[in-house]
Image (tube, rainbow, N blue to C red):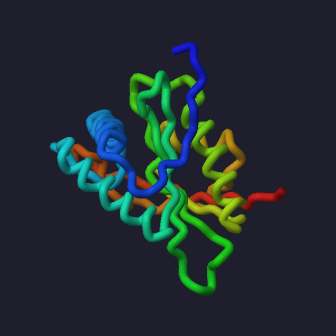
Amino acid sequence: MSAAAEIVVLNAPVADPALDQLATVLVDCVEGGASVSFMSPFSHADAFVFFRKVSASVASGDAVLLAARLDGKIVGTVQLGLDTPPNQPHRADVKKMLVHRSARGCGIGAALMARVEDEAWRNGRWLLVLDTVPGENGHRVYKRAGWTQSGIIPDYALFPDGRLCDTAVMWKRLDR
């Protein structure tokens, strides 16, 4: 792929065609073995329902939903969770950074992460946290983007095929 991805904020209500494309990305990631909360088999309909719930979080102001488009088609996504307790108004959670396997290696993950940091700053959030499987694609993207790993929790979750996996807890302080 030669064109640069366009990173956009998807405002509520997120249109069904966008939800459909987001669901396609999620299903591809689960089919590729990513530990992103879902188990195999995982249907497109289930992924669509998941993103409809995300759309509701966007509508309530609890989340920002970003999408990466190549040639007008969504090939990646990430969420910024803004629903934090009253004593953590400066913090946000980065959730579900996903890139379709056909679009990997093009810098889309890095572009999504750069934009999610911009959106965090725009929303008054300067401390970001996430968790990820150590050594997997996302983990490498986060490390290259300057995230700090606080530790590893063993046997934290399952891969879609049922194998246990660890999680790395990571954070980044935004300084602007």
Q: How far across and down, in percent of the image, does residue 133 sit?
A: 45, 49
Q: Nearer the viewer, residue 171 or 8?
A: 8
Q: Is residue 102 visible?
A: yes
Residue at point 54%, 58% (across, down): 80
Q: Is residue 33 left or right of residue 149?
A: left
Q: Nearer the viewer, residue 14 or 103?
A: 14
Residue at point 36%, 50% (across, down): 36
Q: How far across and down, in percent of the image, does residue 38 sit?
A: 27, 52
Occupied quadrant, residue 2: top right
Numbered-mark total: 0
Looking at this view, name the residue that lies furthest to the bottom. 86
Is 57 above or below relative to 3?
A: below
Residue at point 50%, 69% (across, down): 61
Occupied quadrant, residue 84: bottom right
Looking at this view, name the residue that lies furthest to the top. 2
Q: Is residue 96 left or right of residue 142?
A: left
Q: Is residue 140 visible?
A: no
Q: How far across and down, in percent of the image, does residue 130 sit?
A: 54, 59
